[in-house]
Amino acid sequence: MLVKGKHYRTIWQNPGNLNSVFIIDQTKLPFSFSVKELKNFKDTAKAIERMQVRGAPLIGVTAAFGIYLAALEARSMKSDIKKTIRFISDASKILSQTRPTAVNLFWAIENSLNKIKTALTAGEAVSISLANAQKMAEDDVQVCEAMGMNGLELFKLLYREKKLKRLNILTHCNAGWLATVDYGTATSPIYKAFESGMDLHVWVEETRPRYQGGKLTAWELGEMRIPHTIITDNAGGYVMQKGLVDVVITGSDRTTLNGDVCNKIGTYKTALAAADNNIPFFAAVPVSSFDFNIKDGINEIDIEERNSNEITVTEGLQGKLIRKVKIFPEKSPVKNFGFDITPSRLVTGLITERGIIHPRKSEIKKLK
Amino acid sequence: MLVKGKHYRTIWQNPGNLNSVFIIDQTKLPFSFSVKELKNFKDTAKAIERMQVRGAPLIGVTAAFGIYLAALEARSMKSDIKKTIRFISDASKILSQTRPTAVNLFWAIENSLNKIKTALTAGEAVSISLANAQKMAEDDVQVCEAMGMNGLELFKLLYREKKLKRLNILTHCNAGWLATVDYGTATSPIYKAFESGMDLHVWVEETRPRYQGGKLTAWELGEMRIPHTIITDNAGGYVMQKGLVDVVITGSDRTTLNGDVCNKIGTYKTALAAADNNIPFFAAVPVSSFDFNIKDGINEIDIEERNSNEITVTEGLQGKLIRKVKIFPEKSPVKNFGFDITPSRLVTGLITERGIIHPRKSEIKKLK
């Protein structure tokens, strides 16, 4: 999408030197727009771990590029194919330990490794892993665009049915283009609708603790000049109570066979507020992030408990300097749960690249 | 309650010099504990305006002490009773302009002025206004203690019924002793239960945007050595989903005749999560904060929209310095709704100083 009027993706091969990859360092947003070069798989692992890249689809694509960079390293050491495979396999273990809940990460790594198995030389491992990473990136863009077009149809329907002059959308966290290669998942329908000339406004829940809503989604929407307003997560219920929201749309890190949606902490409370006010709640779910092996999200998904300093330390600007400040009493214990489960009964529908479906086993299993 | 092991109230007369009043400067918490002397009514007005004292009950008591300090000033100028009354009346206008929505503030000032009307000399105005301020403070402590004892009975019941080894309480915002003269409203049952030897743990929702949960409630509980854990507001739903909460208890700024609870923004979402998980939700409501004139909270209560910099600017410690940092994109619009309405259907009961009641008109009107 656009940054300062110029088109970017979140990850791309260095056009001047094919041995490295560029990403947008998302930890610097919204304070500065900074592009970072990843020169080897360890850079890639660090970028995922430090959340310089984040969002399930983008993490997957980044890991695939990480495997490619590992293959490049193996080739530069003049490894034979056995050593190359071992090197890449070791690298993949490091890559897979960067984010414990990211299904796309494991899937991308496994997918890469499976393809590389057919390589006869280190050179072939390089070209196979590169082609794979590039294909994953292109596929992701296509998937996001397709979700956008499906979501656009939904928005048009709401517009007509409710005779709206302006569509008010509420979103939580960042399931935006920054979380994918381009377009985003939950934001893709918003971008497609805005491009189609639809009058819309987005309520952006700030999304504590990391503020991905207020910091990233608001930044994305601002750069695209889409009308939006940041509110606290706490205020999401209030704007719904007041009739100021027509539809809620979020992303999903993992969706079960029964349609339970695992997503950024707070999504569950937001979905409860939507249900209580008869506002449709949709999750944008690429088929790749369904987990067909589990049914009950609450009992079967382990929730990542993250470092408490994400809650106790806030980063922001003082003048032009980025500073970190501690906001709570030093001695108080803090727990930082990263995700929660929105049970399928609170979900109106799932927007996938293959259409919008009900959050039911009978419909989800057809996607397998 | 205790601070560094020593008992404090939030406001008290200077024992060495009866011509001034001490408060805890709450804007410095949780970073430093600082006692401030108020020497005249203007100091008092500033303390309310700058939120060095906050919380509806404490604001009322502080204003009453402000009237006393105004009477002292009038006497020191050797004013006759007419001039004294005029001076106090002018002071009361300044005091009443400090916080636009604080019902207790207006009530406390009016109450003081009415009593002073009977004074025949400046000296009598001083003694009447002092007795009135002291009585308001004592009454507030009694009300809070009574709510605490009623809440304690409720906790004991839960303990027995659910055969608990430890009672897990979740609270939102600060309805603690810092918001009153002592004990607090929502925290009073917690303090009474802890004093009675009950094993308990408190989940403290941080309460964006001003973090009164993470900054004040956590500080209070820490000083009392009560086990507690700070979580984001977003995580409140998750801990309930996981069965880690036995009861939710919050304060209330205003409760309608039908039992709708107006309280700090986010209370509604928290109450929804409690209802969805069959966890009882109680609001601690002193009889003085019922509004018997209105029924429907959502349609009849105007919600204060506050300065957006409460959301966009976060204050914290860098080393030993208190700094303010801006956290969001400069250009993104922000709206800051201060309160929301929890409809009575989500409220299990109201803890008052006169007993615990159902949130129903038939029971509430008896308190009038």
Image: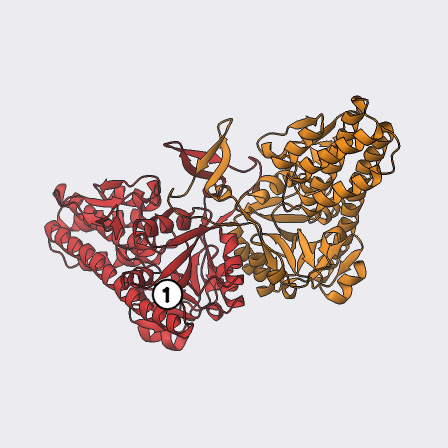
Chain colours: A red, B orange
In the image, B212: left or right of A187?
right
Visible residue check, residue B9: no
Residue lying farthest to the front in this orientation = B82
Q: Chain of mark 1?
A: A
| Front-most of residues B40 and B83 | B83
Q: Is residue A302 left or right of residue B150?
A: left
Image quadrant in which the N terminus of chain B is located: top right
Q: Nearer the viewer, residue A95 or B61?
A: B61
- Label 1 element class: strand
Residue bearing the label numbered 1: A291
Residue B29 in percent (x, y) is at 60, 34
**Residue A46 location in percent, x, y?**
31, 42
The three-letter amino acid code for the residue at tag 1 is: Asp
Q: Residues within 10 Å of mark 1 (few under 14, many from 20)?
A: some
Image x and y of residue B103, in percent? 69, 47
Q: Residue A208: x, y in percent?
A: 47, 48
Quarter residue B259 falls in: bottom right
Res. A13 visible in picture:
yes
Q: How many marks?
A: 1
Residue B312 appears left or right of B343:
left
Q: Looking at the figure, which quarter contains the C terminus of chain B?
A: bottom right
Quarter holding residue A190: bottom left
- Left or right of A315 in this view: B95: right
The part of the image, by quadrant, that contains residue A365 is bottom left
